Structure formats: structure tokens, C-alpha cells
Amino acid sequence: MSEAIPIVMQRRIPPSRPHRSGTRRRHRASDAALVSPGASRRREATAPSLDTEKLLATSARNTPESRKNADRSVRAWIDSTRTKSDERHVQIAIAKQLQRTVYEIWQRYARIAIARGDSAQEAWRAAYQEVQARLPGEEEGARWLRVDHWLKGYKDEHGKRFPGHPPTGLNAEAAKWEKQFLKLRNCQSEWIGYRAACCEGRTRPVAVPIGCNNRMCTLCAWHRSQVARVRVKQMFDRLHDPVLITLTVPNKAAIRHHDFKLFRQRVLQFVKQYDGYILGGIYSLETTYNREHGTWHVHAHVLADCGASLPHWSQKLNLFGEFGYAFNALKLRMEFDWLRLWSTRWGKEPRSNASATDIEGDRYLFENWVRKGRTQPVKTRYFDWTEKKWKSRPIEGLSDQEFARRTRWNQYNRIVLDVRRVNDREGAAKEVLKYITKAAHFCDVPTAVEQFSNATKSVRLVQTFGTWYGANFDAEFDTDHLDDWGQLKCTCGLNMWERMGTFTRADVEIDEAGRAHLRRTFDHKCRGTVARPTIRALDSPREEF
């Protein structure tokens, strides 16, 4: 019996074209490993990009840095194509997320209050829930007015005083967050209509929203920033040499109300040291949250009106044995003065009446700090000719112990400070007043929202100083006639606007440009579609309460 021949299965690659065409075969990418060394090989192709500035580069030869820059260019292109309507949709989504977070905080305090089993707290909570019940035929506004009077107390028409029932303990925290949730939920549910009396119906009535004025609400915060930017732009014409200064401090694990109060004091002390150079300006406190480490970063953006321009890049001087740029000397002097306000290592007594190039004040301490700083670098700067900008990279050859020692010295003896000349005034105004959008980065973290809300309560985050303090703006600028998207303008140009009344959200529509209008034409006698609360629910408070 003959030996059986084993059967070997082989995969045959069909030709991509008929043999008669005379062309060479082309293989799929998955069949690259099956191609014999003598067969034709497909060249590694790169995916073309229609627009390298707007689309992600998909070439296999891309480096992580190039992919990062491509991703940044895509985000910039998306932001440039975003309309006002798109921005509003994003703001509404963030506001809804903030509502859910505040609701979670409110319910958490309510559950803890119930779990404590305190009889006094339970009695107050039962009475509060009974008062919140709607009476027969009572409007929603009248109900909340009655509940508010029950909490705070009131006087009737005869002058009789009825005491309130304020909450205490955990009930107070639950009631506080409940109030914030209700304000956020009712934000922009009512709109004020304005009619152009000079155009006789040729101009479509516009609507201005009634916000909740919550500091973390993106809808209200964006409106406040627009009003503030208009005012800052009016002051730009009075600037001599605008300079943008950024003052920072190390990250903190927690923030308190005292931290913002102390930071404002230190900013004013720093500005006072340069009162001979910084004439006036405006500063804003900005807070960012690091989600990975759970830390807070508080810093200030100062838009300063300086009496002289910053040193030019061609100006050089000898700073304690090393020849360098005069601008770097000024920046080191400012950094040292800002560091001394926060650290006792180099003294805390502030200087007075410093000029733009004054580096002689406290010469011994400043010289000692500069000389030690020169021996503790961990990075070196180089110019990238490909991207046409300066970059930094770690110094090669440093041991781990030496690197850790230098890093520790820089952490305790250096502080980040940035000084730059203002070339784009529109961008500078946005940089100073962008603090209102930072809450969107942590609106889904209940612990961060609670901590930020408690720390920034009744804190002034934007403040003018110097020659800008108490400045009077143009009389024509009227905040009542300013909506979220610019000053109201009618067809004839006279801009004689009159208030119609309060309307519901269903009566308002927003066009492509983001401007709010009333959906239909109302009669001149219309006073709105929102029923105002009455006081009839308080006629017999003893029976109702």
C-alpha cells in the first residue's frame, strides 16, 4: 500500500487585474505578510490631508508633538466656525449639568439631616414641607413668595410683625442648596420684551433674559462678561502703554473665603510697589481646578496702564555679572517682589515707588536670589526653527538626586509670573474677563462646586485700581438696553426703546446670529404673558400657616 500524501492548504491571492492587461498584481494590506520576497511590494502610502491647518494629519510618520499641534489646529478651526447659536447650546448644556450637580448636593444634605434623627430638625422640616404645598387657586409666584415670607418673616398692612422660621444645622445647608437649584432651574425662564417706539412696528421686538445671577451659571456669567468687556473697551482709548501681567501661586488642595481675600490684598500690595510705573488698570481673579490631582490654582490677570513701554528686545544690560536683556531683568525684579509677598525666605517688607528699570532696591537680597537661581536650572531653552518659537527641554547629564534638589529649590524660591505687551486689545479684554467660564470645567464634580461656591461667596473677582478706579463710563451706555449680543439698534437709528413686559420662554426665539426676539407681534397694550405674583395668599396668614 502506497504512503498517503499529506494535503497542504495554501491560500491563493487572486490577481487584481486580468493577466492579459500586463500589469503587476496589487495586494491588500492584510496580505502583505503573504507576499514573497520576489513579488511586488506595496509602498507605504500616507493619507493625504486636504487642509493641514484644519484637518488632523494621519501620516504614519507623525510625531506626538505634530499630532498634538494638528489636534490644536482642528479645535481652533472648530471654534472659529462656531456660531452664536452653537455657543448658546453649549452654555445651556453646561447649565443643565450644573443644575444636576447642585441638586445632588441638596439631596445629600437632606439625606444626612434625616439620618441624624434630631427631633427639632425633623419638626422644622415637616413644617417646611407643609408650607410648600400649593393652596387652591394659587399661582406659582405667589406660592414661593408665601414660602419666603414664612422663612424670613414679614409685616402685614397693619404693621403687625410675623416672625420667620429660619433653618438651622444641616437643614440650613439643605435649604441653601435648594434655593440655588431653584434659581438655576428658573434661570432665563422669563424674558423682558422691548419695543422700538420710534419705528412704529418696522423693528421686530427683542427680548432680554432675566438671569439667576449665580456665579457658576454660564448663561448669566457670559452676559456679565459681555457688559464688562464693553466697558473695558471704552477705557482702552485712555491707555498709554497697556501691559498684561499674570500673577500666580502654587496649587492648593482646598480653597477658602480667606484665600481670595488674602490674594486680593497681595495683588494690591504688588501694584502699589510699582505705583511710579503702573498708573492704573483692572485685575481679575481666576480659579482653575485640576481634576487629576484635585487641586486648585488661583491666579490673577492684571491689565495695567503703564507710564512707559516695556524694554525693547534690543536693550541689554549687565545684571550682576551676566549680560542679558533688560526685559528679563525687569521680569526677574517683578517675580522677586511677588515672591517676597508670599514667602518669608527673602523678606516681606514691600518696596515703594519702583520704576520700570529699578533693580537697585534691596540690592543684596535681589542679587543673592538671582545668582542662586542661575545655578539651579532644570531646563534649557532653545529655538525651534520648524515651528518658529522658543521651547524648553530638560538638561541632559543631571543625576536624579541633583535634579530633585534643583526642583525642590525652584519650588520654594521661584514663582511663575508673566509680563507681556498688549498688541491685541480684544484678546486682552477676553483674557482678563474669562474667569466667568472657568466653572464649566468642574461643574460635574459636586465637591468642587460646593467648595468653590462657599469660597467665592460675596468675593469681588474683578476690581479696578489707580487711575481706573471709579471711572465714569459714557452716559449713552445703558445696561437696561443691552442684551446678551450687543447694544439694541432699531431700523431708523433713533433707538427709542420702551419696555413691554415680562414674557415666558415659549414666547422667545433665537435667530442664527444669536439675538432673541419675540415669536409673534404683541399689541402695544400687552404687558407680557407672565402672571405676576399677588399677595392674596397672605390675607389670612394664621389660617394658611
Image: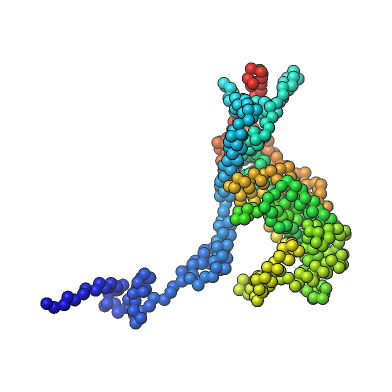
Q: What residue is drawn where x is 83% and y is 67%?
A: 366
Residue 509 visible here:
yes
- Quadrant position of the C terminus in the picture: top right
> How many numbered marks, from 0 up?
0
Q: What residue is drawn where x is 82% and y is 54%?
A: 269
- Quadrant position of the N terminus in the picture: bottom left
In this picture, residue 221 sits left or right of residue 507? right
Task: Name the foreground residue: 427 vs 135.
Answer: 135
Give the percent coordinates (x, y) of residue 248.
73, 58
**Colouring chosen for the image of the structure:** rainbow
Give the percent coordinates (x, y) of residue 458.
73, 42
Task: Name the foreground residue: 160 vs 2.
Answer: 2
* Res 519 quadrant in image: top right
Q: What residue is drawn where x is 49% and y is 70%?
A: 59
Residue 493 visible here:
no
* Res 509 quadrant in image: top right
